[in-house]
Image (cartoon, grey):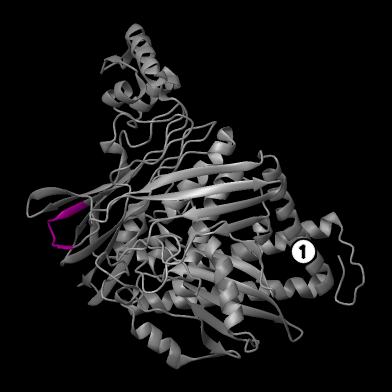
Amino acid sequence: MTDPTGKQVEVDPITLSVVRGILETTQREMTLSLEKTARSSVFNLAHDYSTAVFNHRPEMILQGQDIPIHLGSLIPAMKVVAKYFDGEINEGDLFIHNDPAWGGSHAIDTCFYRPVFWQGRLKYWTVCKGHLTDVGGPVPAGYNPNAKEIYAECLRIPPVKIWDRGQPRKDVLNMILTNMRARRDQEGDFNALIGACQVGERALIRMLEKYGEAQVDACIDMLLNMAEKQMRSLISDVPDGSYEGMAILEDAGHGYGDFEIHAKVTITGDNCHIAISSPPQIPYFINSYEGNSHSGVYLGLMMFAQLPPPYNEGLYRCVSVDFGPKGTICNAQEPAPHMNCTTTPMETLTDAVRLAFEKAVPSKVSASWGHANGLNIAGWDKRHDEEYVTMVLATIISGAGATPSQDGWHACGPECCFGALTSGDVELLEYSYPIIIHRYSLMEDSGGAGKFRGGSGTAWEVEPLNNDMTFITFGEGRRIPAVGAAGAGSTIIDTKVGRLELVKDGVETTIRENIIEVIRPGDRITNKNPGGGGYGDPMLRAVESVVTDVKNGLVSIRGAKEDYGVIISDPDTLSVDRGATEALRATRRAQAAK
């Protein structure tokens, strides 16, 4: 490595490790700052935010172990913001941005960018992105299943400077916040995002002060090269050739039909090219703009790669992506509506990429996680005489996919968040909003069947407390279960897909569409999420493991027989008829071999 004067800079392993540790600690401090200072439950309970650090070029030099749907899209978005303000970036500035047509993911994920200067020169960017509970538009919480174009969804914020040389632009901030519901929550989360960027800035400056610019630059370049080397080494082990995967994006009840999303992965030496093919965009909120689609592709790749840290932009130097022509579902263009895109079609896109890699190296790829099937709520809180609105992240907690060596984790999804979301305490949600949560539990027979079982999905049941409540559903996975891997498959399907059960005026109905509805105290809604996909032939699952799942309420006696070929002869003792079980399993294996 050389410094700006051309002098060779030597980096010893200890210094490299320390600088790497400082960068990782900086990111964690930014994350903790968001958690401890945010206003909304989406931030301080569910942790639906992500942080990253970029250099001046700008390359992502560290991504947080946060929300995958945020992190991939940050790379193109950061480049768009830096290019737009090129020549107008000053010390003390702060920028905001959420527009998918300008490289963002979906508009409710709003991003703040803080340039970090050292001795008068731009050195880094600290970046924080968070899911606001509202971003304007006609429908609370942003998800509008009736939107035919993006203008009916949200307040679009292209790159905008909201601090100028250390001074907040109060008029611009006021204009933005005035267009959002539950302003107190939004303003609190704005301040948390801004503060987290500042926390990161201070830590980076202290690092430069202690170790010097040349030494730090050399360490960062080595970390980028280290990530690149690891990815190239992995790809070089994959046989050269082209591999194709396809996943179905199911119709969510609005009459557009199912769609196929295709991914073609071409390996040439230590380089990888991923080509995406998707149908033309539609007037419905599942279109994904290019920035968001980066996240889906990168997650599918990383589910295959399973590389150790460091995680930075060096990982993708040997990866090129073609999203197909503009105006398609995975490469949308204005004015396509998009708000549901971070779950649908992102998770389907991820599956298509993952399935393509499975054909290249079948033993290395995990099963799909449960897709998001969630709920937003809004209304008037009589306790405080103010409006409330939130995305209930607990309602999208689904099961994780199984792997070649173990069962999927329970209540860990959805796939787009990959374990980074948390549910939050039931009591704190009830304290924050005028609701009663009657149930939050795992669901029987929800995990995909396989030699290794998929993780279980969850049920979340709620009743409004003191006033009418609007709820808005979003997502999919209500007809097609999470895709398994390596020959996994389930016989019982209805318990493995998402749905919403509504009890209104004493009448119970099952909802599988994305709708906007109002309920009153005494009515209840239960959001049921899918489990993760299984891995391997379910007829090869150990009988003892199936019985243990029945004991733990994860698999029913019916499920043991239908999904796993295990016949439990006594429901009280859970004893197994070994002869009948072996005969049934043999029959199933013979049928599968035909």
Which residue corresponds to the image point at 25% horizontal and 77% vertical from the top-left? Answer: 386
Of residue 526 and residue 451, the one placed in the foreground of this image is 451
| Left or right for 165, reference 329 | right
> Count of labels shown?
1
Of residue 40 and residue 517, the one placed in the foreground of this image is 517
| Left or right for 553, reference 487 | left
- Residue 264 lies, in percent from the top left, at 53, 48
**What is the secondary structure assignment of the residue under circle 1?**
helix
Query: Which residues are the magenta region?
Result: 517-525
Of residue 282 and residue 584, the one placed in the foreground of this image is 282
Placement of the N terminus among the 4 image quadrants? bottom right
Q: Amino acid at mark 1?
A: Asp
Q: Quadrant of residue 589?
A: top left
- Residue 223 lies, in percent from the top left, at 74, 59
Magenta span includes 520: yes
Magenta span includes 69: no
Q: Quadrant of residue 306?
A: top right
Q: Can see residue 239?
A: yes
| Left or right for 408, reference 271 | left
- Residue 577 lies, in percent from the top left, at 32, 10
Mark 1 residue crowding within 10 angstroms, few (<14) / some (14–19) / many (20+)? few
| Up-down relation of residue 553 to residue 156 (above or below) | above
Which residue corresponds to the image point at 54% horizontal and 87% vertical from the top-left? Answer: 163
- Residue 235 lies, in percent from the top left, at 67, 45
Of residue 356 and residue 229, the one placed in the foreground of this image is 356
Residue receiving disc 1: 221
Which residue corresponds to the image point at 29% horizontal and 31% vertical from the top-left? Answer: 492
Placement of the C terminus among the 4 image quadrants? top left
Residue lying at the far top of the rendered structure:
579
| Up-down relation of residue 209 to residue 28 (above or below) | below
